[in-house]
Amino acid sequence: MTVETEVLWLDEHRVVSLRELVEISGLREAELLELVHSGALPVRDAARGEYSFSARVVTVARTACRLRDDFELDTRGMGVALKLLERVRDLEEEIARLRAQLPGS
Amino acid sequence: MKYTDYYAALGVERGASADEIKKAYRRLAQKYHPDVSKEPGAETKFKEVAEAYQTLKDPEKRAAYDALGSRPQGEEFRPPPDWARQHGGNGSEQFSFDDVDFADLFSRFGARGAMPGRDFEVPVEISIEDAFRGTTLSLSLSMPEYDANGRVRRVPHAVKARIAAGAVDGQRLRLPGKGGKGFQGGRDGDLYLDISLKPHQLYRATGHDLYLDLPLSPSEAALGASLEIPTLAGPVSLKVPAGTSSGRKLRLSGRGLPKPRGGAGDLFAVAQIVVPAGLSEQERELYQRLAESGSFEPRRHFRGEGA
């Protein structure tokens, strides 16, 4: 059976609530909040204590959940790993950007 | 189904202690975890290691696994008829072993009640043209599915997904409910697509911007030229200013990849001055005259340096 399906872009235009993030990332609310407070997970809006996030964060939170499960990390470990992974990603993007400007062979 | 040697996957003896198994897993996980390792084949290797650990770390699953006996890796076999009843956990009568992967035998051990379906992540390569115009992907996946008795089987899963124009390298998409089926009222898992762009013959993409090498003859670069440039939407004309050196980027605004919410990146044509490998007699003569009459000093800034 083939079904045409709903496709959600995980980019900065889409907003997800804390509740949604709990449901789709596999992390508990307390873990997500700790990651937010440690600065590892950027918040889009924290008005009236209601957190919302850019949908980009879904990928980050899922990575955190994977790291927690596969390496038995606690929240602090996840936070450090996420920050390092973010730096690696930024550097990789920078390399890709510079490489795109180099003349091809 | 094919027998998988979980002890070999972790590199431990069959009689290894729980602690030895954990240590072996940790060592291999650090080496092959796809979020950490960029080694080729790391992801496949990690899956094998994780699958082995999921079963061997759990005493109940390990006992069930050991009850299958020791066989050569990859040997075709079927579990003995009463194996599932003895080790199955959920009191399910009889396993159907058709269309089942080895790992599926252990995946629902000890599970009770509602369980959410598994999420799947699938890397997808699309062309730059597809990213520009949008495309419809037809994916054929194989996912484990459980019936009401907890019996598992592999079910082919066809997903058709419309990818609107504007995807870039690294774009992630979420297809809610298109992952593994939930069990006993658990929600269905999600399918995640990890988009990357195939290398293109002409364009190099970075975000929504595209780069294109623009070879110019020395005279075109010196005198300027009006050229036709290939873009994803068709050829456009570009004025190369006189006195263009190699490396100069000529921007064609809005001719890059479209952005999902409107607007588009730019196309940069990067000037590259190329000279013919061989010159005709007449060309050689003209270059010679140019060399003799020219006042151009490309290395003026060397002077006074390092002396």
Image: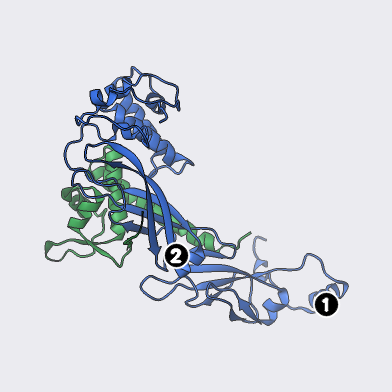
Chain colours: A green, B blue
User: Residue most toward the left?
Assistant: A48
Give the residue displayed 20% in from the left and 65% down from the top: A45
Which residue is the site of mark 2?
A: B135
Q: Chain of mark 2?
A: B
Other residues around mark 2 within 10 Å, as few (<14) / some (14–19) / many (≥20)? some
Report if residue B59 is visible in the image: no
Q: Percent x, y for residue B302?
A: 66, 66
Depth check: give the residue in front, B166 or B217: B166
Which residue is the site of mark 1?
A: B286
Q: Chain of mark 1?
A: B
| Quadrant of the drawing holding the N terminus of chain A | bottom left
Considering only vertical position in the picture, is B59 above or below B261? Answer: above
Type of the residue with mark 1: Leu
Direction from residue B297 to residue B105 in the image, left or right: left
Regarding mark 2 in the picture, which secondary structure is present there?
Answer: strand
Q: Percent x, y for residue A36?
A: 21, 54
Type of the residue with mark 2: Thr
Direction from residue B96 to residue B209 in the image, left or right: right
Give the residue displayed 33% in from the left and 61% down from the top: A7
Other residues around mark 1 within 10 Å, as few (<14) / some (14–19) / many (≥20)? few
Depth check: give the residue in front, A91 or A32: A32
Q: Which mark is residue B25?
A: none
Which comes sooner in the sequence, label 1 or label 2?
2
| Quadrant of the drawing holding the C terminus of chain A | bottom right
Q: Percent x, y for residue B145?
A: 30, 42
Regarding mark 1 in the picture, which secondary structure is present there?
Answer: helix
Please name which of the two marks, 1 or 2, marks the residue nearer to the observer: 2
Q: Label 1, label 2: how many angstroms apart (C-alpha)? A: 52 Å
Depth check: give the residue in front, B37 or B110: B110
Q: Percent x, y for residue A99?
A: 53, 59
Depth check: give the residue in front, B292 or A61: A61
